[in-house]
Image (cartoon, grey):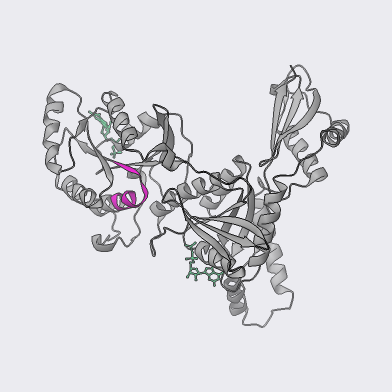
Amino acid sequence: MKPLVAIVGRPNVGKSTFFNRMIGERIAIVEDMPGTTRDRLYGDTDWNGREFTLIDTGGLELGGGIPVGQVGLSGQPGDIMNHVTSQVQLAIEEADVIIFMVDAQAGITAADEEVADLLRRSKKSVILAANKADNAKRRLDAVEFYALGLGEPIDISSIQGVGTGDLLDLIVEALPPADEMEEEEEEDIPRIAIVGRPNVGKSSLLNAILGVQRSIVSDVPGTTRDTIDTEFEYEGRKIKLIDTAGIRRRGRVGAGVEKYSVLRSTRAIERADVTILLIDASEGLAAQDTHIAGVVHEQAKGVIVVVNKWDLAQQQRRDEREGKFARPDDEIDSAEHYRVTLAEDLKFIPYAPIVFASAKTGYHVKSILEAALHIAEMRYLRVPTSRLNEVVQEAIRRHNPTVIRTKPLKIYYATQARVNPPTFVFFVNDPQAVHFSYERYLENRLRDAFGFKGTGIRLQFRPRS
Ligand code: GDP
Ligand code: GDP
């Protein structure tokens, strides 16, 4: 669980310069969401052994009129101050540590004072960084930022890379203690994360699931504010639900908020065995959903794609047709049509079941829960080595590996190295000689033979020693 460090400040103080210097090529999440001014907004880094996620709030597009309480964002382009304050407010809500960056060349501006005011009232850990302190004179001048009432400013030059090490020291000092971030997970309880864009119905689904079985064991406060865990029992089995909606602030939807929600989802997915990815039936799959599905796939987690608000979609359909042409099997047709399109867009996770549901009416809520439990079990499936090698040998016999290097790939034997996620190690003559299409072929053969419906599996190739 990585803490979140946000860089805030008015435009042009050097936030993205600093961010790029810190993250460099080590971008964990590269996003190309339309509407963002830059595509690299957050990435993981580490200093003195502490890992954290750095977010450059300068790139968040918050236009389009997000209501931000008393600040009253007008949504007008060019309304820079409001833009900055909404970034700051988001950071206050979401980040563990905030770097407030100011410009030592420009000195204190009214905008800096306004931001400082918000930050002082927030009681968050704030580090004041006076950037562009490129020379001795500017470093001396930087002292004026004391006046912002946020303690001693640390002077840095992002361009020269001077002072950034000291800043990193301060960041690491300000992070919550590592053991507080650590999760002691009970291994045998399946953990299910509910993720999706704001307003898709995450809270509603959580409530609907809990309504199915009312014996809630406990509300486990998440170790970070990111998630709220709920432990409950279903047919004698303990389950932990990881809810990313819990700390959502009502009515706030916008690209900036969604950025954070992606981050929050990623963290929830990391902790979960099975992810329920909620999609709004009438909105369809958004870039962000595909991105989240990609995270699930990379981490070889279990996944169920839930097309929520199906009641609404069907209602709209009926309204459009005014009932005239509706046939009894119309709903099935539209679900099938939807399923095909969705499966095409999510073809990198062909193993994911797609469920049409309504958190509101309860339609298919029980199926979601049962599918999730089934998938969690699948992740613990162990394949006997002898049976595994029969399947592998048969696969090789039917379709020889393509030669992509000078020497052809030879697979000697395979073994299941671990469960959760099911991981198969193939001992080969040359791991480099495994073409990804052949890897996919082998994965499909394993799935044909053993199932693993709903969960990612891993194939690893090692040289036989
Ligand atoms: P942002 O809008 O806060 O993300 O600012 P940018 O990172 O885009 O930087 C704005 C301008 O300030 C760019 O022209 C940078 O090259 C420049 N800049 C950033 N850091 C420094 C620095 O440490 N010293 C100087 N002299 N210029 C800098
Ligand atoms: P969250 O932001 O993902 O947690 O979404 P919520 O659970 O708060 O739901 C957002 C809105 O969608 C609320 O007004 C819900 O009542 C509504 N909603 C959620 N699920 C459904 C559903 O299956 N059908 C319909 N018609 N509305 C739903």
Q: Main secondary structure of the magenta part?
A: helix
Relative to 276, residue 421 above or below? above
Q: Nearer the viewer, residue 112 or 325?
A: 112
In the displayed structure, does residue 162 sit left or right of residue 365?
left
Q: Position of residue 83 (x, y in %)?
A: 28, 52
On the question of residue 330 being in view, the answer is yes
Relative to 346, residue 412 above or below? above
Look at the image and say whether residue 95 sits in the magenta stretch.
Answer: yes
Relative to 71, residue 167 above or below? above
- Residue at 21% x, 49% y is 120
Where residue 54 sits, quadrant-wise, is top left
Q: Nearer the viewer, residue 103 or 456?
A: 456
Q: Position of residue 407 (x, y in %)?
A: 77, 17
- Residue at 35% x, 53% y is 62
- For the image, the number of numbered tags is 0
- Residue at 72% x, 27% y is 434
Where residue 145 sits, quadrant-wise, is top left
In the displayed structure, does residue 349 sit left or right of residue 248?
right
First to last magenta residue range:
88-98
Q: Position of residue 379 (x, y in %)?
A: 69, 45
Q: Position of residue 388 (x, y in %)?
A: 82, 35
- Image quarter where the C terminus lies is top right
On the question of residue 200 being in view, the answer is no
Look at the image and say whether residue 339 sits in the magenta stretch.
Answer: no
